[in-house]
Image (tube, grey):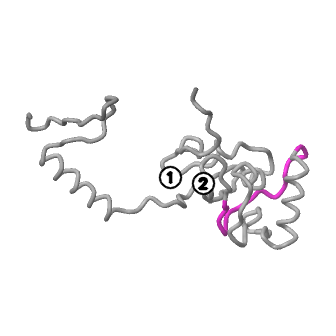
Amino acid sequence: MKDLEVSFITNKNGKKTHAIIPIEIYKQLTALKSLIKYSAPLSANELYTFSCQNVTAHGYPKGTRHKPFFLVTKDSQAVLMPVDSVPSHIQNLREELLSDGTLQLDPEHNCFIFTKDTQFQSASAAAAIIAGTVRNGLDVWTNREGFSLKESGFGKKTKKS
């Protein structure tokens, strides 16, 4: 076996079941494991941001990757006036959030502010409340690296044939 050669053990069908690696590669892998263990953890609640019309909101997906809920965090902003064509269910939800105090007027910034963390059925519903117009939440919410929810692996997946 050469210094950096990896060998495999296969089952009777030829499927690889085990790898035999040189000790130097093993040492490197275990060192890498300890680095990952003590670095900043990847949070299940990675923060995503959505900005439009001089408002900015933050939140994160919750639940399953294929159909996550979306939690908008406290102090996120929403536009004052939705467009006339916003669907009635979004308008009704917005009125409910205003009447229960979840959304309050922020006259200093000329917008509404979320007074508490608020969970929505989808990232799109959250984006529609914030923007006052229909938006594809999987496309508009982005993380600090600039990746959208869709690019981060959220949303419905098509089955491979």
Residue 84 position within the rendered picture, expressed as x and y whole percent measured from the top left: 91, 46
Q: Mark 2 Cα within 10 Å, few/some/many (few <14, many 20+)?
A: some
Q: Residue at x 53, y 45 (%)?
A: 152
Task: Verify CB contact (< 8 Å) between mark 2 and mark 1.
Answer: yes
Magenta stretch contains residue 81: yes
Give the mark count.
Answer: 2
Q: Nearer the viewer, residue 51 or 47?
A: 47
Residue 137 position within the rendered picture, expressed as x and y whole percent measured from the top left: 68, 46
Residue type at mark 1 is Arg
Q: Residue at x 33, y 62 (%)?
A: 39
The quarter holding residue 118 reads bottom right
| Outermost residue toward the left in this view | 2
Asked which secondary structure carries label 2, the reply is strand
Q: Nearer the viewer, residue 49 or 64?
A: 64
Mark carried by residue 45: none
Find disc 1 in the rendering and name its residue. 144
Residue 37 position within the rendered picture, expressed as x and y whole percent measured from the top left: 32, 62
Q: Is residue 135 left or right of residue 144?
A: right
Q: Which residues are magenta?
A: 71-85
Q: Residue at x 62, y 59 (%)?
A: 58
The quarter holding residue 95 reads bottom right
Residue 31 position within the rendered picture, expressed as x and y whole percent measured from the top left: 21, 56
Q: Is residue 67 left or right of residue 96?
A: left
| Outermost residue toward the top in this view | 161
Residue type at mark 2 is Thr
Of the image marks 2 and 1, the number of the one nearer the N terminus: 2
Q: Is residue 2 left or right of residue 64?
A: left
Magenta stretch contains residue 122: no
Find disc 2 in the rendering and name its residue. 49
Q: Nearer the viewer, residue 151 or 111?
A: 151
